[in-house]
C-alpha cells in the first residue's frame, strides 16, 4: 500500500498541491483527472521518486516497486527490441546467474557432510523456488507476447531500438514496465503512440494486471473500462470519487452545483460581514466587535470553483468555399519505400462533405496515404483532388513542425494571411493563450499547448478539405470534445486518422481499415466497425479474415445473393421490412421509456437536498449510469435497424 500525506507543491505564489492526502490499496485501479496544468504528471513524478521538491510525505513498504511511464521519451538504445525488453527481467537473470554459481559450487564441493555444503543446498532450493514463482522458465514467451501485443511484428524484434521512430521506442519502454510487473503502475498517457488494436490489447492486459494502477489518459473508454476510482486535481485541491470516469463526470457536475450554491451563500455572508466591519470599525464601543469579524473572515476557507467556461477553447472552423461534388479521386494508387510495399493499388473516392476515419494497425499505411493526399509524398497511380478543393493538413507530429525558437505569437503571425495578423492575439486568446503566454517560446510549451498552437494555425485558412492525422494527441478531455463538436459542425470534407475510440464515436459516417496493403470500407462509425470486425483480442485482428469465412451480410446482401424468384424475393423483403419496422417501433418505445426514467431520476439527484435526504446516494448514481448505458445501447440498435431498413428499401427501388 502507498500512502500520501499532506503533499504540497508550490512554484512561487502558485500552489499546485495544497496538503493533499490519499492512499493506493492493493490491486486498485485509479484514474487521475484534471485540466492540463492541474499537476497530474507532477504527481506521478513525485510518486515515482523523480521529483523531490515537495512538502509532506510519500510512504510505502521497503520492497514496494513502482513502474512509471512518462509522456516524453528521454532515452535511446542500440540494443535490439527483444534485448531491450528482456532487460526488464533483470531479476530473472540475476536468479539464473546465482543458480548456476550455486550448482557449480555444489558440484565442486568435496566435503558433503560440512555445514557449508548444506547451506549451499538450502540456498539453491530457495533461489530455485523464487525462480519458479517468477515464471522465469516462461519469461522469453512472455516478453514476445507483450511486444507482439503492442504491435511489433516478429521479424523486427531483432532490429536496434534506435532505428525506430519515437512512438515505437515508447512502446519498448511500455513493454519493459509491463514486464517488470511492479506493485504500482504509473502510466502517463500510455495510448498516445498506440493504434486501436494495441489499445484494445493493452486494456485487456491491464484488466488482468495483478498490481495496482494509476492512469492518466484522455481516452475516456479506456478509463471507463479499467478504473473504479477517480482522483481529481483542481485548484490545488484533491477530490476522491469511487467511480470510473463517466460516473465521476456525473458526480462532479452535482458536486460543482452544490459548491456553487455554497459559494453564493458564502459570498453573501462575506459581503454582509464586510458591511458590518465598515459600519462598526470607526466606533469605539464597536471596534472590538469589528476586529473579531475581520479575524473570522481571515480564518474562513474560501470556496474556489474552477471556471470551466473560461478555460475551454473557442474552436470553430471558418466557413469553407464550396468544392466540386467529388473531393478526391484515387485509382490504382501504390506506395513503396525501396523494396517495401506499403499500399497496393488502392482505389478511393471521397464525396464533398463526407467525414471519414482511417483506422488500422501502425505501419499499415494510414499516415502514408494521408501524406499522399496532402501532396507530401510521391506515389504510383492516380491521386488527385476535385474541383476547387483547398486542402489543410494536420500532421501526426505537427508539434515537431513548429519552430521551437519562435514565440507563440510569432508562429501565428507568420502563418496568418495579411488581414488576420492584427487579430493574432485575439485568435490566440480563443485557444487559451492570454497576456504574457503569447510570448512564450514554443520549446517551453507542454504537449497540449503545442497542439493548441497547431490547431490555431490550421484555422487561419478557410480550407474545404481537412486531413487530420492523430489530432487529439496531448489534448485534454474538454478540448477533445470541443474539437469533435467543431468537426461535426464543419461543412467541409474531413479525413481523420485516429486511435481514439471515444473521439471517433459518432463522428464519421464511413471507416476505412488499412490491412494487408489494402483498404476495406465500413459504412458506419467506429463502433459499427469494431462490432463488424468482432475485434476483442489481438489474435483475432492479427489473423485478419479467416480462410473460407464468409463476410457478414446485411439483410439486403442476403436477399440479393439468394437464387429465389422475383416474387419470392419480394415476399421475403416485405417480411423482413415488417420485422425491421416492428423492431424500430419497439426500440422507439423502449427509448422513450428510458428517457422518462432518466429524467425522473435526474430530478431526484439534482435536488438541492439530495445529499441530505438520500439514504444510499451511490445506488442512485449506479442506477443512473445503468439507464444511460441501456439508452445508448437501445439507440445504437435503433440506428442499425434504420440502416438495414433503408438498404432493403433501396434494393426494392433498384429491382422495381
Image: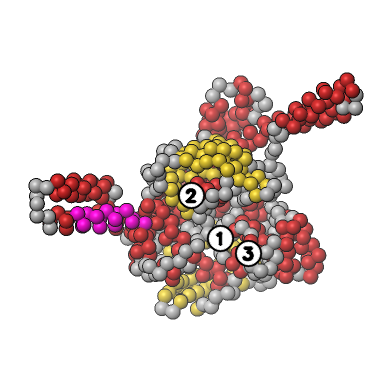
Marks 1 and 2, Cα distance to the nearest angstrom?
A: 29 Å
Circle number at residue 48: 2
- Image location of residue 9, percent across then percent down: 61, 45
What residue sits right under mark 3 in the picture?
443
Q: Report the label total.
A: 3
Q: Which mark identifies residue 470?
A: 1
- Outermost residue, right side: 283
- Front disc: 3 or 2: 2
- Local packing at callout 3 (Cα closer than 10 Å; few below 14, some 14-19, many 20+) is some
Q: Residue at x 66, y 26 (%)?
A: 607
- Locate residue 16 relative to residue 274 in the image: left or right: left
Say left or right for 282 vs 301.
right
Q: Secondary structure at mark 1?
A: loop
Q: Bin the neighbour count of mark 2 within 10 Å (Cα to Cα): few under 14, some 14-19, many 20 and up.
A: some
Q: CA distance from mark 1 to mark 3?
A: 21 Å
- The residue segment tinted magenta is 88-102
Label the magenta part by its dominant secondary structure: helix
Amino acid at each position: 500500500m502507498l500512502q500520501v500525506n499532506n503533499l504540497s507543491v508550490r512554484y512561487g505564489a502558485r500552489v499546485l498541491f495544497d496538503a493533499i492526502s490519499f492512499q493506493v490499496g492493493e490491486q486498485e485501479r485509479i484514474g487521475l483527472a484534471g485540466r492540463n496544468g492541474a499537476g497530474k504528471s507532477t504527481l506521478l513524478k513525485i510518486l515515482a521518486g523523480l521529483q523531490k521538491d515537495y512538502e509532506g510525505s510519500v510512504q510505502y513498504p521497503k520492497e514496494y516497486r513502482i513502474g512509471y511511464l512518462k509522456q516524453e521519451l528521454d532515452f535511446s538504445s542500440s540494443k535490439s527490441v527483444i534485448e531491450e525488453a528482456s532487460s526488464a527481467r533483470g531479476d530473472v537473470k540475476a536468479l539464473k546467474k546465482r543458480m548456476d554459481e550455486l550448482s557449480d559450487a555444489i558440484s565442486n564441493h568435496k566435503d558433503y557432510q560440512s555445514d557449508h555444503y548444506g547451506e549451499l543446498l538450502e540456498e539453491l532450493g530457495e533461489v530455485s523456488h523464487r525462480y519458479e514463482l517468477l515464471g522465469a522458465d516462461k519469461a522469453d514467451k512472455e516478453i514476445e507476447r507483450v511486444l507482439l501485443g503492442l504491435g511489433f511484428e516478429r521479424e523486427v524484434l531483432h532490429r536496434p531500438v534506435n532505428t525506430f521512430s519515437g512512438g515505437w521506442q515508447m512502446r519498448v519502454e511500455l513493454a519493459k514496465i509491463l514486464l517488470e510487473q511492479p506493485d504500482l503502475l504509473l502510466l502517463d498517457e500510455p495510448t498516445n503512440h498506440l493504434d486501436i488494436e494495441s489499445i484494445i490489447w493493452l486494456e485487456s492486459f491491464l484488466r488482468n494486471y495483478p498490481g495496482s494502477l494509476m492512469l492518466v489518459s484522455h481516452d475516456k473508454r479506456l478509463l471507463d473500462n479499467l478504473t473504479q476510482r477517480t482522483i481529481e486535481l483542481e485548484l490545488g485541491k484533491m477530490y476522491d470519487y469511487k467511480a470510473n470516469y463517466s460516473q465521476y463526470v456525473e458526480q462532479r457536475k452535482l458536486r460543482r452545483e452544490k459548491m456553487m450554491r455554497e459559494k453564493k451563500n458564502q459570498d453573501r455572508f462575506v459581503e454582509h460581514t464586510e458591511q458590518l466591519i465598515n459600519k462598526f470599525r470607526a466606533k469605539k464601543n464597536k471596534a472590538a466587535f469589528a476586529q473579531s469579524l475581520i479575524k473570522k473572515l481571515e480564518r474562513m476557507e474560501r470556496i474556489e470553483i474552477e471556471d470551466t467556461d473560461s478555460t475551454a477553447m473557442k474552436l470553430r472552423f471558418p466557413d469553407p468555399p464550396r468544392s466540386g461534388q467529388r473531393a478526391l479521386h484515387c485509382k490504382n494508387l501504390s506506395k513503396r519505400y525501396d523494396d517495401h510495399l506499403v499500399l497496393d493499388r488502392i482505389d478511393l473516392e471521397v464525396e464533398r462533405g463526407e467525414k471519414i476515419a482511417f483506422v488500422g494497425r501502425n505501419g499499415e499505411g494510414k499516415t502514408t496515404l494521408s501524406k499522399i493526399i496532402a501532396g507530401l509524398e510521391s506515389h504510383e497511380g492516380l491521386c488527385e483532388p476535385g474541383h476547387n478543393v483547398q486542402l489543410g493538413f494536420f500532421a501526426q507530429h505537427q508539434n515537431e513542425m513548429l519552430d521551437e525558437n519562435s514565440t507563440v505569437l510569432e508562429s501565428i503571425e507568420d502563418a496568418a494571411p495579411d488581414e488576420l495578423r492584427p487579430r493574432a492575439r485575439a485568435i490566440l486568446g480563443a485557444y487559451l493563450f492570454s497576456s504574457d503566454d503569447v510570448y512564450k517560446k514554443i520549446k517551453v510549451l507542454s504537449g497540449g499547448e503545442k497542439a493548441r498552437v497547431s490547431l490555431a494555425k490550421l484555422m487561419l485558412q478557410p480550407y474545404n478539405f481537412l486531413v487530420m492525422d492523430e489530432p487529439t494527441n496531448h489534448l485534454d478531455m474538454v478540448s477533445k470534445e470541443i474539437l469533435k463538436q467543431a468537426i461535426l459542425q464543419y461543412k467541409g470534407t474531413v479525413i481523420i486518422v485516429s486511435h481514439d475510440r471515444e473521439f471517433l464515436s459518432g463522428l464519421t459516417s464511413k471507416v476505412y481499415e488499412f490491412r494487408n496493403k489494402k483498404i476495406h470500407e465500413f459504412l458506419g462509425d467506429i463502433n459499427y466497425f469494431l462490432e463488424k470486425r468482432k475485434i476483442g483480442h489481438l489474435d483475432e485482428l492479427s489473423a485478419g479474415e479467416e480462410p473460407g469465412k464468409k463476410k457478414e451480410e446485411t439483410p439486403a446482401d442476403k436477399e440479393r445473393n439468394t437464387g429465389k424468384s422475383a416474387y419470392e424475393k419480394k415476399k421475403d423483403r416485405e417480411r423482413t421490412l415488417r420485422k425491421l419496422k416492428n423492431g424500430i417501433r419497439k426500440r422507439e418505445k423502449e427509448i422513450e421509456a428510458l428517457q422518462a426514467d432518466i429524467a425522473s431520476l435526474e430530478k431526484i439527484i439534482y435536488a438541492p437536498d439530495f445529499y441530505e435526504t438520500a439514504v444510499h446516494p451511490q445506488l442512485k448514481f449506479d442506477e443512473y449510469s445503468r439507464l444511460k448505458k441501456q439508452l445508448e445501447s437501445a439507440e445504437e440498435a435503433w440506428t442499425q435497424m434504420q440502416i438495414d431498413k433503408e438498404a432493403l428499401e433501396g434494393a426494392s427501388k433498384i429491382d422495381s
